[in-house]
Image (spheres, rainbow, N blue to C red):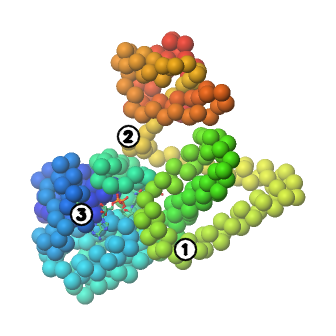
Amino acid sequence: MTNTKQVCIIGVGLIGGSIALSIKETFPEYEIVGIDTDLSIIHEAISMGVVDWGTIDLNQGVEKADIIFVATPVKATEYIIKQLCQAQLKPDCIVTDVGSTKENIYESARCFQEKSISFIGGHPMAGSEKSGVKASNRRLFENAYYILTPSDWTPQHAVDVLKNVLESTKAEIIVMSSKVHDEVVGAISHLPHIVASALVNFVREKKDNPYYTALAAGGFRDITRIASASVEMWRDIVISNRESMLEILTEWERHIADIKQAIDVNDIVQIEQFFDTAKNFRDDLPIRQQSLIHQAYQLNVDVPDHPGVIGNIASVLGRNGVNIRNIYITHNRERGEGAMRLTFVSRDVQQRAYEVLTTAGYGVQIED
Ligand SMILES: NC(=O)c1ccc[n+]([C@@H]2O[C@H](COP(=O)([O-])OP(=O)(O)OC[C@H]3O[C@@H](n4cnc5c(N)ncnc54)[C@H](O)[C@@H]3O)[C@@H](O)[C@H]2O)c1
Ligand SMILES: O=C(O)C(=O)C[C@]1(C(=O)O)C=C[C@@H](O)C=C1
């Protein structure tokens, strides 16, 4: 149990909105206040039930808060923390953030120490390439890790209060130092985003030949989904995690140079080892049961080039009571044929759809 009554979310976007929704579901008695730069965002958040009320006035929004979440891009977070240090906060207020980098935010939060305000860095390790309050979801963090990096002046009971509130996200909370956070997350999150964007830019340079974009299908799309994420957010992340990123990118260049060298001298053993080492490690990565919104129960359906075939697939499923959650078409074959990737909410619905479509004569593959 906590005595928390009012939670303030600064930056009511994807992450701030999702945290607000999780907290509201578990603690309906809490008042959730939203602060953003634009009143239209506040109005939208109120109409979606994400916050109870909101304002664009930081001082007005935080004055009665028991817990403040700063959920803005990380450079804005540094600035907002400085403003909070000057603001009138309740004496036992806890300030936390959700930023993807932790060292820079920890440094800017040192000003809380002389005011004896508890500051606990935070980073939920789940998200999406989408932004804004519209994309928020109360189940976003289910079964994900939620990293906390408490400051050394923050008492343990404040960390316990925050953990208690964060249990509403159903994430697994782990504690580490902000330095270790930035090194590890730099490698497993920030580097992949750079690689994805570099890969897209690489193909973009070849766009004069239309085959590049036409043939960029499954593998390319899978590995580059995250290149569609918020530019502001990722600009701030790589600027803020500069030191770790420079070291990581130097290591990365070594990996690329090694495989390039192996191809150059036709070193078949080394080429095989390159793929084999990666495959073994990837196959052994622990699988965390993801939240419902991440689970994708999919079917690939061969789509012959006939007028009305897509409508027919949708209606045959509809007639049999099967709801489609998402449809994605890949035109990855010559002469107009393609594949349709359908997503369903559960394994049962996926199985039912498979039966319906195979009975109707479609070529269907289940994707695990
Ligand atoms: N998107 C992800 O996958 C993800 C995952 C984990 C953590 N994060 C971190 O969470 C934070 C927010 O990311 P997001 O994806 O929710 O972004 P978002 O763009 O969806 O939301 C950010 C919100 O902050 C508001 N904002 C910006 N500057 C502000 C300011 N000065 N004052 C008040 N509001 C301001 C924006 O208007 C927007 O509503 C970032 O620090 C990011 O690094 C993102
Ligand atoms: O799933 C995605 O789209 C994400 O990019 C989520 C992701 C990640 O890299 O794993 C992105 C940034 C965050 O700081 C944490 C999570």
Place residue 41 in its image quadrant. Answer: bottom left
Answer yes or no: do the residues labelled 3 and 2 have beta carbons within 8 Å? no
What is the crowding at mark 3: few (fewer than 14 residues within 10 Å), some, or many (at least 20)? few
Q: Please give the name of the residue rendered at 34% of the width and 72% of the height, measured from the top-left corner.
A: 76
Q: CA distance from mark 3 to mark 2?
A: 31 Å
Return the residue at label 2.
292
Mark 3 near ligand 1 (CB under 8 Å)? yes
Q: Nearer the viewer, mark 3 or mark 1?
A: 3
Disc 2 marks a residue whose amino acid type is Leu
On-image quarter of the C terminus: top right
The spot of residue 77 in percent (x, y) is 33, 72
Q: Please give the name of the residue rendered at 45% of the width and 56% of the height, measured from the top-left corner.
A: 229
The spot of residue 309 in percent (x, y) is 50, 20
- Determine whether the residue tagged by mark 3 lies in a helix, strand or loop: loop
Return the residue at label 1.
244
Disc 3 marks a residue whose amino acid type is Asp
The spot of residue 104 in percent (x, y) is 41, 77
Question: Residue most toward the bottom?
Answer: 114
- Determine whether the residue tagged by mark 2 lies in a helix, strand or loop: loop
Mark 2 near ligand 2 (CB under 8 Å)? no
Q: CA distance from mark 2 to mark 1?
A: 33 Å
Q: CA distance from mark 3 to mark 1?
A: 34 Å
On-image quarter of the N terminus: bottom left
Position of 71 with respect to 300 (left or right) is: left
Q: Which mark is residue 38?
A: 3
Judge whether 63 appears above or below 347 on screen.
Answer: below
